[in-house]
Image: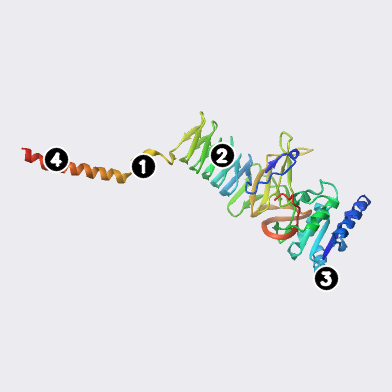
Amino acid sequence: MFQKPSDGGYMPQPDEVETVVGPSVAVEGDFVSEGNIIVKGSVSGSVKTSALLSVEEGAKILANVKAQSAVIAGHVKGHLKVVDRLEILETAQISGDISCAILSVAPGALLSGKIVMKGLAMDEAAKPKKRTASRRKVSEEEQVFEEEMPMEQ
Amino acid sequence: MYVYLYDELVKHKRYKQEMRSIENRLTDFGIAGRIVRLQQFTNSEAVISEEMKRGAEVAVIVGDDKTFGRVLSRSASLGVVFGFIPIGSEKDNTIANVLGIPIGEEACEVLARRRKVGLDVGWVNNRYFISQLHIKPHPIRVQYDEQFAVSARNGKMELVVCNLQPFVWNDTSKRQYVVHPQDGKLEAFLRPMKKKTLFKEVYEEPSVFPFEEMVIQSDKPFVMEADGKKSKETKVTIRLARNRIHMIVGKHRKF
């Protein structure tokens, strides 16, 4: 969308409408966009985009965030739900739970909250249904063992 | 049948030769028609509807960005197909570039090909705007799509809403950027004013918000300029009117 006039030809980008929140602009409310969002100022309420969210250094978000992918270099206070890739840069400060598929954290970034990532193999092993089944098995064996014990005596 | 709406500027002797060759070319293509010369206070809506009664199907605007905005802001709802022959410099014809129409004689070829598309226009306080809407720095509050509100920390903001005319600004490192409007949404550019010196106004980096409906409010009246027409308002509602204009455009259009 942004291009220098010297570049000449136009690059068609039908759906990549960019939303830019400038450095001294404050946005309040449900901020929903279908295109990429670049935040340089402050946003409070909620942020939702089906594309890339970029929170630049010095920017503040006091909101729950949902995005396809995100690059965070500023402050975020709220839950972050990213479908695809979340990149946390060294200047970032995040206070809230994070949910994403791919996570990259640069050294120096400050995080406070729970991180949940889908696709963990340990999750399936620790399912409650299986745990109850194994307990039943043990209890049956114990019962058999108890029944056999008096016969030996 | 075609009707040609000539702006006053084509009367200038600078364009005499160019106009002659355009008229010859239109005759060659067999699309020459009645010529109506617009004056400063001509009601273009009345002129076009009168011509439509006589059988006009295509109204061709001959002039620059200002002519384009002036004619279409009043006649967008008439249901006639519009064409455009841009006259003058590239600087005065930014809309033609978006529509993919070359300046001068070559525009006749685009007109003859009749590649017709539906264009979205802006609707502001009971009238259309085609190119750009501008509000000078003023303490305004802006609400987008009834979902979120935008305000500046410093107070005063400049607002530009682009429909077909590209928006140009220079950033702090004096680089020039051009934001090309896209069809399907209106784009609002907000620039909070940092400070005002004797010679110039210093602005912050602009914010860009694509939208379909926007409400601008202020306690004090502000000056709004839409397609070159100024008015004083305290509350303005801007909406997107989809496919309102049927327009003949070029192959190299930018949407």
Kind of residue at badge 4? Phe
Kind of residue at badge 1? Glu
- The percent position of residue A34, horizontal first and vertical second, equals 58, 49
Whether the residues at callouts 4 and 1 have beta carbons within 8 Å, the answer is no
Mark 2 sits on what residue?
A60
Callout 3: chain: B
Callout 2: chain: A
Mark sitting earlier along the chain (4/2): 2
Q: Are marks 4 and 1 on the same chain?
A: yes
- The percent position of residue B27, horizontal first and vertical second, equals 88, 60
**Residue at mark 4 to residue at mark 2: CA–CA distance:** 64 Å
Q: Nearer the viewer, mark 4 or mark 2?
A: 4
Q: Are marks 1 and 2 on the same chain?
A: yes
- The percent position of residue A22, horizontal first and vertical second, equals 64, 41
Left or right of A147: which side holds B130? right
Q: Which mark is residue A145?
A: 4
**Quadrant in the rendering for residue B240:** bottom right
Give the secondary structure at mark 3.
loop
Q: Which mark is residue B54?
A: 3
Kind of residue at badge 2? Lys
**Residue at mark 3 to residue at mark 1: CA–CA distance:** 77 Å
Give the secondary structure at mark 2.
strand
Residue at the farthest top position: A107
Q: Which mark is residue A124?
A: 1
Whether the residues at callouts 3 and 2 have beta carbons within 8 Å, the answer is no
**Residue at mark 4 to residue at mark 3: CA–CA distance:** 105 Å
Q: Which mark is residue B240?
A: none
**Residue at mark 1 to residue at mark 2: CA–CA distance:** 37 Å
Q: Nearer the viewer, residue A7 or B150?
A: A7
